[in-house]
């Protein structure tokens, strides 16, 4: 039998099942945490334990992302002294999710090794360029992978693991960097330390499953079935394959054109995803990270302790997101997160006015910064990546996420480029007011445009967002 024939058989089986039971009955009587086997028997939900180890391996890429974000923070002074630039301020879809994660580990290993052995500024920059390549690939692919291998009822929880891993990586880099100012050449150890998790990622992904969604899209239905059996267990394979077949409307992967994302019927979802990422970057979170050490030092807190406080707030918020993601849903967390950031910006705005004394203003500013980090980690940080991976149909998912992530990094670049200049020209009061306005705009945008995806299969989400014309 041809591959196309197998797809049609699975689709026929799915249609028979839905005529007998229906999606309405599924939603009202069983809820999102029930499943049917091939003969319509209620078999409960697949065990979350089967997919957990694969998810944990993939989130190592996010750990590395967080580690490399923070590794230079505590070590910069000793690096600049050893390499002689102290005081110089100027100085995936084709290979599958599993292979892409392995490939992102390689430039991280190479780049970290080059940075650890660097004898000049340019050697260090070249090493960081390699690391940056891996950092750009890893988190996006990890979000896709986690979304596609996780059961629907824990998909949000597993998706929040990437944010937790990023926070743990950031905290780890701060801890290991503490001796850098006292021990000569310790910064090289900090870079060597990142080689181990990158090597573990590359090795363990070899023993992890490939995304069944990617395999099915490539016409490898038998392989997709085998991976579903590893992830969900035998009784759930038929219903999972039927769900995949339902979304296959005869579109082959090689017919996809990028113009579909900008002008076709996918443009609305691309607009929602890109706007969410833009609002995430315009929320002022980067300003918090840029400016936190200065504010904490004004309050008499050393920079090392300040970084730890910010890191703890970030981790705490990430754990809250993990607990609530599949209970309250993505949309509620996003609205609550951006609303919390509005309050945080109000505290920082108040601290910059004459309404409070100088000492009170410092404490308000510190409180506002910590609240901003906490609120961001609960929703605005982890949810957009999870939502993006859920919202797009399998046929265009990787390409669409790439477009939105590219837009994310463009906005991130300009925010970083212009922040200090705007801070000097218009001051913190006006700048924080602008950030607060964007957070409020985000709340209104989410209420109107974002679909709740909690507990829904990826195919149900596709139908809700892209109905057949």
Image: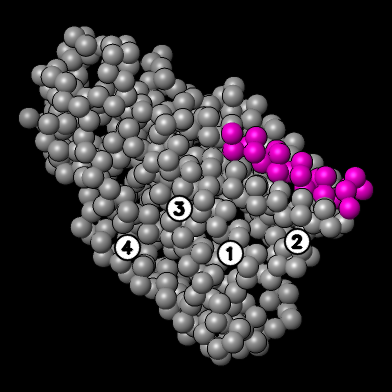
Q: Which of marks 4 and 3 is nearer the N terminus?
A: 3
Could you tell me which secondary element the residue under label 2 belongs to?
helix
Q: Earlier in the sequence, mark 3 or mark 1?
A: 3
Could you tell me which secondary element the residue under label 3 belongs to?
helix
Distance between the alpha carbons at the discs numbered 2 and 4: 37 Å
Position of residue 337 in the picture relative to residue 233 (left or right): right
Distance between the alpha carbons at the discs numbered 4 and 1: 26 Å
Q: Mark 4 and 3 residues: CB-CB less than 8 Å, in contact?
A: no
Q: Mark 2 points at which residue?
A: 295
Q: In which quarter of the image is the N terminus?
A: top left
Q: Which of marks 2 and 3 is nearer the N terminus?
A: 3
Query: Which coloring applies here?
Result: one colour
Instruction: Answer few, some or many: residues within 10 Å of disc 3's Cα (few below 14, many 20 plus, some between 14 and 19).
Output: many
Residue 194 shows which numbered tag? none
Could you tell me which secondary element the residue under label 4 belongs to?
helix
Q: Name the residue under label 1.
A: 308
Position of residue 424 in the picture relative to residue 102 (left or right): right
Magenta-tinted stretch = 336-357
């Amino acid at each position: 039998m041809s591959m196309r024939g197998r797809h049609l058989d699975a689709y026929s089986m799915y249609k028979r099942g839905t005529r007998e039971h229906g999606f309405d009955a599924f939603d009202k009587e069983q809820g999102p945490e029930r499943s049917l086997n091939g003969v319509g028997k209620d078999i409960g939900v697949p065990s979350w334990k089967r997919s957990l180890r694969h998810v944990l391996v993939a989130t190592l890429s996010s750990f590395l992302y967080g580690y490399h974000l923070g590794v230079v923070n505590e070590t910069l002074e000793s690096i600049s002294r050893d390499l002689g630039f102290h005081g110089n301020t100027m100085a995936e879809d084709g290979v599958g999710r599993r292979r892409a994660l392995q490939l992102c580990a390689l430039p991280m290993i190479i780049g970290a090794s080059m940075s650890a052995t660097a004898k000049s500024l340019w050697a260090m920059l070249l090493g960081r360029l390699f690391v940056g390549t891996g950092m750009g690939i890893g988190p996006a692919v990890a979000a896709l992978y986690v979304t596609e291998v996780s059961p629907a009822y824990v998909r949000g929880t597993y998706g929040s693991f990437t944010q937790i891993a990023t926070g743990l990586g950031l905290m780890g880099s701060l801890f290991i960097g503490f001796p850098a100012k006292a021990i000569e050449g310790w910064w090289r150890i900090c870079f060597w330390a990142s080689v181990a998790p990158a090597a573990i990622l590359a090795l363990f992904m070899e023993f992890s499953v490939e995304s069944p969604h990617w395999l099915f899209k490539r016409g490898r239905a038998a392989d997709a079935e085998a991976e579903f059996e590893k992830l969900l267990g035998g009784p759930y394979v038929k219903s999972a394959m039927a769900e995949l077949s339902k979304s296959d409307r005869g579109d082959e992967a090689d017919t996809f054109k990028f113009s579909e994302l900008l002008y076709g019927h996918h443009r609305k979802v691309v607009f929602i995803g890109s706007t969410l990422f833009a609002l995430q970057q315009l929320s002022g979170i980067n300003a918090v990270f840029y400016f936190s050490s200065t504010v904490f030092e004004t309050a008499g807190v050393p920079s090392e302790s300040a970084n730890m406080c910010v890191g703890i707030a970030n981790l705490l918020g990430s754990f809250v997101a993990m607990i609530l993601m599949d209970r309250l849903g993505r949309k509620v967390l996003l609205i609550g997160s951006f609303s919390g950031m509005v309050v945080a910006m109000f505290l920082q705005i108040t601290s910059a006015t004459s309404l409070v004394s100088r000492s009170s203003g410092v404490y308000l500013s510190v409180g506002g910064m910590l609240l901003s980090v906490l609120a961001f980690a609960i929703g605005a940080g982890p949810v957009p990546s999870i939502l993006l991976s859920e919202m797009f149909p399998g046929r265009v998912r990787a390409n669409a996420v790439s477009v939105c992530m590219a837009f994310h990094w463009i906005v991130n670049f300009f925010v970083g480029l212009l922040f200090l200049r705007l801070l000097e020209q218009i001051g913190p009061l006006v700048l924080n007011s602008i950030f607060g306005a964007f957070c409020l705009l985000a709340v209104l945008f989410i209420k109107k445009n974002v679909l709740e995806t909690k507990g829904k299969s990826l195919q149900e989400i596709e139908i809700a967002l892209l109905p057949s014309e």
